[in-house]
Image (cartoon, helix red, strand yellow):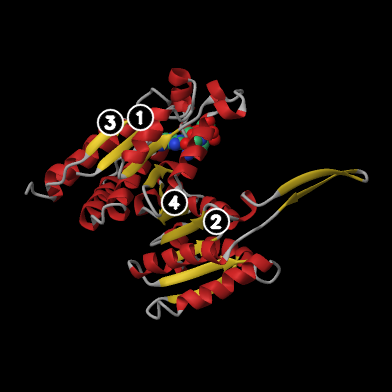
Amino acid sequence: MPKIALLPGDGIGPEITAETVKVLETVGRHFSRSFEFATFSIGGDAIDRFGDPLPPQTLEGIRAADAVLLAAVGGPKWDHNPGHLRPETGLLRMRKELGVYANLRPVRAFEPLLHASTLKQEVLLGVDLLILRELTGGLYFGEKSRKPAVGGEVATDTLVYTTGEIERIVRMGFEVARTRRKRVHSVDKANVLESSRLWRETVERIAKEYPDVQYDHILVDTCAMQLIRNPRQFDVIVTENMFGDILSDEAAMLTGSIGMLPSASLGAGVALYEPIHGSAPDIAGKGVANPLGMILSAALMLRHSFGWEQEATVIEQAVAEVLAEGVRTADLAGPAEPTVSTSRMGDLIVQRISAKVPIV
Ligand code: NAD
């Protein structure tokens, strides 16, 4: 029985976690699967209760789990704390502990929500892409320095990648593409960066192992432009840390709502699943948050950690169908549209799954 460590965190976290558990339990009942859930404290909640954003019992819990499902951490209450007592520190420490090196962010345009995007609906219709971002190398982790210099200071960041780091993320890109439309775009800046030239050579070598997958190199600036001009051309985009950080936020806007987007962080061991949004302190405790980003993250967990493709797809279809029927949480609704609460949205997804799959 898979053990799932639940980390509700702060703000809207507990509200959306409750709905996600409801959905997982329903999937379990309908597919004769069982889960063992254990809830642990992280972020601001853990600072308040244990004086540590990632207390030892949480660390033990995630080490013993088969997958980790996190809502979000943070809030104004802890904004002025020193570094080691900030909610995000708990998150970063956990990612490091899990050794996750790949962030997967699927971006799918849900037709009934396209009006909420700032882009034209005809550009967005049918968008279904996946950004695979390297998480542990590049500029964010290279050597940094700051020294006095004539007229001020000089600051340096170093962009470092090893062949091994590139190989494992690129290989994951090709593997994931095989389960999708078999198309990879590798993003780099090989016209100016040496690290990108190593990246490009590595992609070409790995690509030979995947003759069934079509691949292209694309410069990061061109990719940023093409994501807005014609996003449907993309299937899997694989890229280094900072390019992925920027492109994945750009791509998130293709769907129109931050509340809808799931993510998975994968490594060699236990994986971490979380919606891309934060803890939304402005709406916490009001029962109006959109739980779909976390529910879709749970679907990714079923697919990537347990290989339960059918179960994952049922959740994704239920979400698409409920949206198609016009059900909206406040963040998704137009000015005159009626809205449902967080728990009503969870209930409707549960009902939809129950109607689709007979109990076996
Ligand atoms: P945010 O994503 O929490 O909120 C941005 C806006 O989107 C807000 O208006 C919020 O109400 C809305 N929103 C977000 N998720 C929503 C949902 N599921 N349903 C409905 N509306 C939703 O970003 P922020 O306001 O910049 O940050 C708030 C806190 O969250 C900060 O403390 C920040 O550090 C933290 N944060 C945490 C994570 C994480 O845990 N991975 C990620 C980003 C931000």
User: Does dot 4 land on a helix, a strand or a loop?
Assistant: loop
- In terms of sequence position, does the residue under pointer 4 or pointer 2 come before the other? 2
In front here: 166 or 230? 166
Query: Residue at the spot x=75%, y=46% of the render?
Result: 145
**Position of 32 relative to 240 (above/below):** above
Left or right of residue 143, residue 281 in this image = left
Mark 4 — residue?
A: 255
Query: Residue at the spot x=61%, y=56% of the render?
Result: 138
Give the Cα distance between marks 2 and 3.
Answer: 33 Å
Give how far across and how far down residue 135 sits, in percent.
52, 52
What's the residue type where badge 2 is placed?
Gly
Confirm whether residue 335 shows in the render: no
Mark 1 — residue?
A: 40
Disc 4 crowd rating (10 Å Cα; few below 14, some 14-19, many 20+) is many
Q: Which mark is residue 343?
A: 3
Disc 1 crowd rating (10 Å Cα; few below 14, some 14-19, many 20+) is many
